[in-house]
Amino acid sequence: MVDLQELETFLIEYRRNMHRYPELSHQEYQTTENIRQLLLSHGVTIVDTPLETGLIAQITGAETGPTIALRADIDALPIVEQSGVEFVSENEGAMHACGHDFHTSVVLGATILLNQQRDKLKGTVLVIFQAAEEVAQGAGKVLETGVLENVEAIFGFHNDPSLPVGTLGTKVGELTAAVDRFEIIVKAEGAHGAKPHEGVDPLIVLAQIIQAFQPIVSRNLAPDSHAVLSITQVHSGETWNVIPESAYLEGTVRNFSAENRQKVEQRIRKILEGIALANEIEIDLIWHASCPSVTNDEKWTTVSLEAAQAVGYETRIVKESAIGEDFAYYQEKIPGSFVMIGSGGPYELHHPKFRVDDTALFPAVKYFEALVLSVLK
Ligand SMILES: [Zn+2]
Ligand SMILES: [Zn+2]
């Protein structure tokens, strides 16, 4: 049996080391290798899969029973770190600014503890160390392996800097947003800056689009929809005396229901058709549908909250968060629960100064241990 105090110290050090060497989505080769080596050194079985990065471990209980899954994500973000921590990123331009180093260390700790308690488990635990969460492609790749086919429940978490350490929040139903990205290309007609009547000014069209999109959320959706539409990039023109021939816009929509998600896309398409018609030009829309909402099952959320309380967490029912999380793809196939664990702030996820509080790590390990022991008892 590993000493708990030693394990905590080890995991904090492991997390710091992982933080120092972040790897971007689909490039988590060394990260995967480090996880593999640690698991093997503790006698944990690794499932044979075609995954290039990321891996799945397996803990087989002494008695037969259901198969459940835990999931951690392992990738970093293309951000230049400004956190000022002593274990600052040494891979310039990459940073664990979403705390996936923390997630990985927590789930590694729980895996080590649970693997030692196989004699207490009635069933099997698959532990997913998932690559490419930030680009919402990793969960799909894990599902494609077919390894999760018989999984009856899946559990995951994200650290939440807005929650104090020692707090765990979740809710039944939609917890995170369904995320869509759109790109719009206005194909107008350039002209001399002094002769706008000889062309069609794409900048005027761009302004019409931005204005016309604003009432979609405020007028077409119900007041309690919590949807958001943001235009985040516009580009057009190169100089002062030429009306350019095209304009480009990009943005994102976040929704908490499949119905609203569809409605917003339909409104965007209709509005663009109308503006194109009125200006006698073409407008192209490229729609990138990303992950749906993390949607928590009632039974498994209750089980999660009870496990959290049993290990001393103050639990909260939290509001939906507009972040995207590709754990949602697992929940389209497998019921489960996703929780937010307080990591202390003060900087938000994806901030160049983001950091997590070391003291938040081990309670989260104990939470996953308690959760699995309660489900497979
Ligand atoms: Zn993130
Ligand atoms: Zn994240």
Image (cartoon, grey):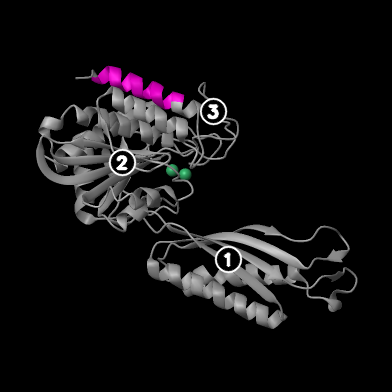
Whether label 2 touches label 3, CB < 8 Å? no
Q: Which residues make up the magenta segment?
A: 4-17
| Comparing labels 3 and 1, the label whose residue is closer to the camera | 1
In reply to whether residue 12 is colored magenta, the answer given is yes
* Magenta segment main secondary structure: helix
Closer to the N terminus: mark 2 or mark 1? Answer: 2
Identify the residue shown where x is 61% and y is 72%: 212
Q: Nearer the viewer, mark 2 or mark 1?
A: 1
Q: Amino acid at mark 3?
A: Ser
**Residue at image x 68%, y 62%?**
248
Mark 1 closeness class: few <14, some 14–19, many ≥20 residues within 10 Å: few
Q: Disc number at residue 168? A: 2
The local secondary structure at tag 2 comes to strand
Numbered marks: total: 3
Assess whether mark 1 and mark 2 are in contact (beta carbons under 8 angstroms). Answer: no
Q: Quadrant of the C terminus?
A: top left
Q: Secondary structure at mark 3?
A: loop
Give the crowd class for mark 2: few <14, some 14-19, many >=20 residues within 10 Å. many
22 relative position to 71: left or right: right
Compared to 331, does 186 lie above or below? below
Amino acid at the residue labelled 2: Leu
Is residue 262 a member of the stretch shown in magenta?
A: no
Image coordinates for residue 166, horizontal then vertical, percent: 31, 34
Q: Secondary structure at mark 1?
A: strand
What residue does disc 3 label? Answer: 89
Query: Residue at 32% across / 53% down in the picture?
Result: 330
